[in-house]
Amino acid sequence: MGFFDKLKQGLSKTKNSFEEKMNTVFSAFRKVDEDLLEELEEVLIMSDVGVETSTKIISNLRDRIKKEKIEDAEEVKEALRKEIQEILDSVDNSLHLETKPSVILVVGVNGVGKTTSIGKMANRLRQDGKKVVVAAADTFRAAAVEQLEIWANRAGCDIVKREEGVDPASVVFDAIKVAKEKEADVLICDTAGRLHNKKYLMDELIKIKKVIDKELPDASKEVLMVLDATTGQNAISQVKAFKETVDITGLILTKLDGTAKGGVVIGIVNENKMPVKFIGIGEKIDDMEIFNSGDFVKALI
């Protein structure tokens, strides 16, 4: 099953999905008028696209309808797809892992599914033929290391771990050494869940990043923030807060199959100018995919 089919299946699990709401509006209106646009705007807002982004989409759609003299509701649907696609493609969604090894540093608040996402991401990269090493740098919780080890074993990749309470940056240092020795393609570093306002934890993250930059100065580096799609608009504010401290390069969006508000992806990209790199659409190990904006828009509408 490809990304589009999995995404379509995942999004359809939620009751009253984005697509259903859209189809209800389009089937109710034969005439392209302001009432149709107002209904569409309401659906966008209700689907967690956000007020700012929804207003922008409808304003651009209104202009497009006038310019292209659109008179058919089906053509409006296609125009809406284009508007959403343009937002998603306004940022670089591609994954930059050009060097050997490349590094993916994974950050985020507690409970968003970081450890699970790393296991799934490692599996996804292994399927692409890449050799992956995982660093268990969440040394605050013993359970985090155990959980990550289970996922690493499932994905068939090496894990570097130390005892609970050690300096997370030292675990990353050791993992870089192992990644070089084993000639790994990608090193994925787990980190403890943290709130942006906990200064000592954010300082620790900066320390980890310094170790990576010092030991692998020329490596491709992705700093990916994991977000739980079911938190809706809170996800947008989480990104804004983290961006002030950490140079995030992209997002991993989890639990998209657990929310009827799939539009949050559009709002996050538009308001934070931040690309989605991976998307989680289920609980199995192969339910993590590299984000494809075209397939996402098709599955959404």
Image (tube, rainbow, N blue to C red):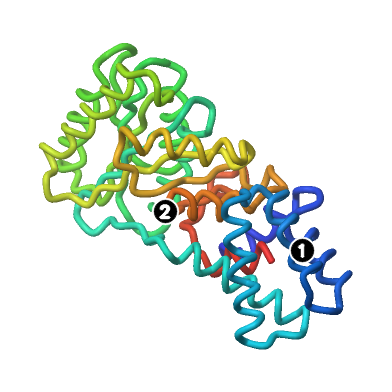
Q: Is residue 1 above or below residue 227?
A: below
Indicate the amino acid at tag 1: Met
Q: How many marks?
A: 2
Q: Residue at x 57, y 66 (%)?
A: 84
Residue 166 point in image, percent of width and height: 26, 14
Front position in the image: 246 or 293: 246
237, 279: nearer the viewer:
237
Q: Position of residue 102 (x, y in %)?
A: 24, 49
Q: Which mark is residue 205?
A: none
**Which part of the image, by quadrant, shows the C terminus?**
bottom right
Q: Position of residue 134 (x, y in %)?
A: 33, 37
Left or right: where 251 falls relative to 217: right
> How far separated are the C-alphas under marks 2 and 1?
25 Å
For the view shown, which residue lies furthest in the top direction? 165
Q: Which mark is residue 273?
A: 2
Q: Residues within 10 Å of mark 1 (few under 14, many from 20)?
A: some
Residue 277: x %, y % from top left: 43, 53
Comparing 263 with 114, the one in front is: 263
Give the image quarter of residue 93.
bottom left
The mark nearer the N terminus, 2 or 1, is 1
Q: Which residue is mark 1?
A: 22
Using the rendered view, name the quadrant where residue 36 is placed: bottom right
Disc 1 element: helix
Residue that sits furthest to the bottom in the current view? 69
Could you tell me which quadrant the N terminus lies in? bottom right
Q: Classify mark 2: residues with Cα within 10 Å, few (<14), some (14-19) or many (20+).
A: some
* 101 is higher (above) or lower (below) than 195: below
Q: Amino acid at mark 2?
A: Lys
Residue name at image x 69 percent, y 44 percent: 259
Q: Residue at x 55, y 47 (%)?
A: 280
At horizontal 61% and vertical 66% (from top left) the residue drawn is 59
Is residue 41 left or right of 119 when viewed as pictured? right
